[in-house]
Image (spheres, grey):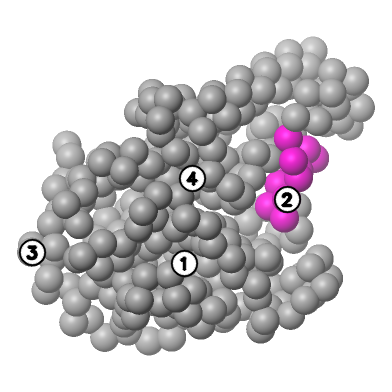
Amino acid sequence: MKKIISLSILSFLSNFSYSLGTLDPKLDSIVEREYNSRIAQPEISHREIKQGVYLIKCNTVCGNSLLVYGKDGGILINSMLAKTLPWLRKKIRDISGINNIKILITTNAHFWNSNANGLFGGMMDFMISHKNTRKRILSNSVIEDLQILPGYSQERHVDNAGARVTFLDEMELNFNQEKVDLIHLKGASTDGDILIFFKKKNIIHLGDLVLNNGFPFINNDFGGSTTGLMIGLKKALDLGNEETIFIPGLGNEMSYKELSNYISKLNQLLTHIKLLKSSSLSYEKILQDETFKEISTNFQENFISNKESFLKQALR
């Protein structure tokens, strides 16, 4: 059953008291090693997707943020890292003139999407996520198989980092004369992933279903699966059309054709992995398989995922 939320119904949520977010020093050394820069001086860039819609990226271990704003205020999708918050807020002000966003939507619980949630708490009206994402943000967990940091311990966030507004299947948000559909995907990258469809603007945010045209990240411990990922990707394609702009969790926007090609290549890779698995080949043998290596050249590596980590996830 679809839940319908409007700002008039939720205005009472704007007066919550919030505390600080999650500052994680474990990330600093990784950023310095991989990017030869300090997390205290991130490079935040942006590009205009459509009028009032901006894709915001950072040069370190952050996922994309998407700012969508109009006369009623701004929606931000994903909050990056707590330590990048001053630079992200400055970028939002420079782009739009908005000091504070009205709504923060979190696509899943991974730290590169949600680490600054608690710091955003007192600056907006309300935060939205799937129910499972709130639960995971407010729990200690380990993220296995990260390319940049295997076995990363993601500590429980402060209470205000978990969304006060959650849903199970679908939610309809009406804001800035725009209908926004939030659609839960069962067991994709995690068990809390959502598609966010700005219907008038014809923009779909994919969250961690796509990472910079790279290998997906299937967080098995967070309820993710390759089957759910493929169902989610096909769902996103079915929702869109030739004019739809798709926003991945990392990297630049994608066209309908680019997403379709990505899904086709990913299906080819997963089909071949399944074939090799049915032959009882070991992880090490599959890594050395020539066809596996050839198909894998279609995908980029990033700080989250590479062919080694993806194969471990696909074999589970």
Residue identifier under label 4? 247
Say whether residue 293 is left or right of residue 219: right
Residue at 81% x, 66% y is 34
Which residue matches tag 1? 79
**Gap between marks 3 and 2, in whole Å?**
41 Å
Find residue 163 and report its image quarter.
bottom left
**Residue annotated with mark 2:** 302
Relative to 217, residue 41 above or below: below
Is residue 125 visible to us here?
A: yes
Residue type marked 3:
Ser
Amino acid beneath label 4: Ile
Per the image, label 3 sits on a secondary structure element best described as helix
The chief SS type of the magenta part is loop
Q: The magenta stretch spans which residues?
A: 299-309
Marks 4 and 2 close (CB-CB < 8 Å): no
Q: Distance between the residues labelled 1 and 4?
A: 15 Å
| Cα gap from disc 3 to disc 4, whole angstroms | 28 Å
Count of numbered tags: 4
Q: Mark 3 points at which residue?
A: 8
Q: Which residue is drawn at 20% across and 45% down?
A: 179
